[in-house]
Image (tube, rainbow, N blue to C red):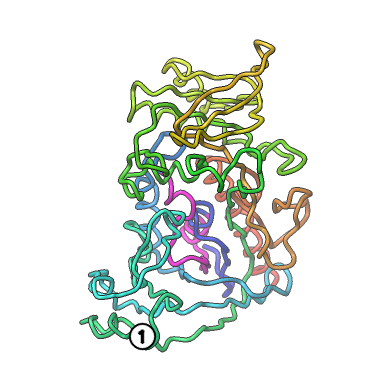
Amino acid sequence: MVENGKPILVIGGGMAGMTAAIEAAEAGAHVVLVEKEASLGGRVARTNLYFPKLCPPGCGLEINFRRIKNNPRIEVLTLASVESLSGAPGDYEVRVKLAPRYVTSACTACGECARVCPAERSDEFNLGLSRTKAAYLPHAMAYPAYYVIDRAACPDGCTACQEACRYNAIELDQREEQRTYRASAVIAATGWSPYDATRIENLGYGRLKNVVTNVILERLAAPSGPTGGRILRPSDGKPPESVVFIQCAGSRDENHLPYCSAVCCAASLKQATYVRSLYPEARITIFYIDIRTPGRLEDFYRQAAAGGIELIKGKAAKIEEDAATGDLVVTAEDVMNGRRTAVRASLVVLATGIVPNTEGLPAGFARDEFRFAVNPPGLKGLYAAGCVRRPEEVSATVQDATAAALKALQCAGRSARHA
């Protein structure tokens, strides 16, 4: 058992952060888990199915939520962010800011506050594709399972939600809170964001309605998504007759992201199986520079090829719209046949790359030339894990986070011996 009076602090409550917190706590350490959103789960919670077994997110998240809930050594802070970090290995001072939730732990998630709420807001869990009430549960699997009040969306002076709550769980006068922790080690597991596809002007995202991104398609395919699991064209809500996936949309490009994001090829192959399952007669085409599906992810390539999905080696040059139908024409290279080709599509999906969420990390965490957090040899006390460190799929993220937990435990153990 590790005990030096100081917790390990984990920044980020996605799969990497939860794994690091659970593994450290189950080894005997106290852990403070800091998450900026209103619930845990991160990007995995937004997927339809995740690698490598194509599990629905509830499969892995529910187990982790239960382990966290049942472990008294884990303190979970949501709507929280690290404001500053100072000190040395074994003795860090961490200042954490907590935004008001306006709902207390007395909440039973009955939903009465949402039923009486007169205001709406954009639903960030569904990437703005739907709306919620200003009093809302982050999503169906949310942990902690408490509602949140978006005061910025509320009409001035409105107290309808508070008056409707029979459990007195709503406190509309809550204020921002500051807390200070002394930590033995800090793990950064802040995850990733998709590359801004509007910056790839020739591919038309944000301008052409039927051009979407891979993260949007994941929500469209999810049963909990805005379309109830039906992949439909944004322009008219119709099922697509043909879908084109464009790989390396912004990745491996000196004008955007010069690196490979590692999992985009397998993700598009996986998403192509979503389309094939829903629409057996749809024409599906994938334009790629190189298909990169290492290890077990190679199975997705074999399944796609066997499922009649057309793979064309070549980079897409532009996308144009047929104004009369909303259909899209993708002009691209066909390297293997040495010619230019044009493919008509009902829907185009851009495989945008992984951008590490290192912008808000406190001073002390090192970054490489691509802004990914790194663990330099010899650096003790500060560790990065998951996609903030490198692009990777869920199983690799779990292994990476477990390794970070071990390093943090070793640091805590050393500081306890030398105290």
Which quadrant of the structure image shows residue 390? top right
Give the residue at the far top of this rendering.
337
Of residues 347 and 67, the one nearer the viewer is 347
Residue 96 x, y percent position in the rendering = 58, 76
- Residue under numbered circle 1: 171
Image spot of residue 413 (x, y percent): 63, 63
Q: Position of residue 298 (x, y in %)?
A: 53, 24
Q: What stretch is highlighted in magenta?
A: 20-47
Residue 267 visible somewhere in the drawing? no
Is residue 84 found left or right of 37 in the rendered image? right
Position above or below: 240 against 234: above
Which residue does the image show at 75% across and 57% down from the upper left? 366
The residue lying toward the viewer, choosing from 351 and 187, is 351
| Residue 254 at x, y percent in the picture | 77, 40
**Residue occupying image coordinates x 59% and y 33%:** 319
Assign the C terminus to one quadrant of the image. bottom right
The answer to whether residue 84 is seen in the rendering is yes
Residue 108 lies in quadrant: bottom left
Horizontal arrangement in the rendering, residue 237 relative to residue 364 (left or right): left
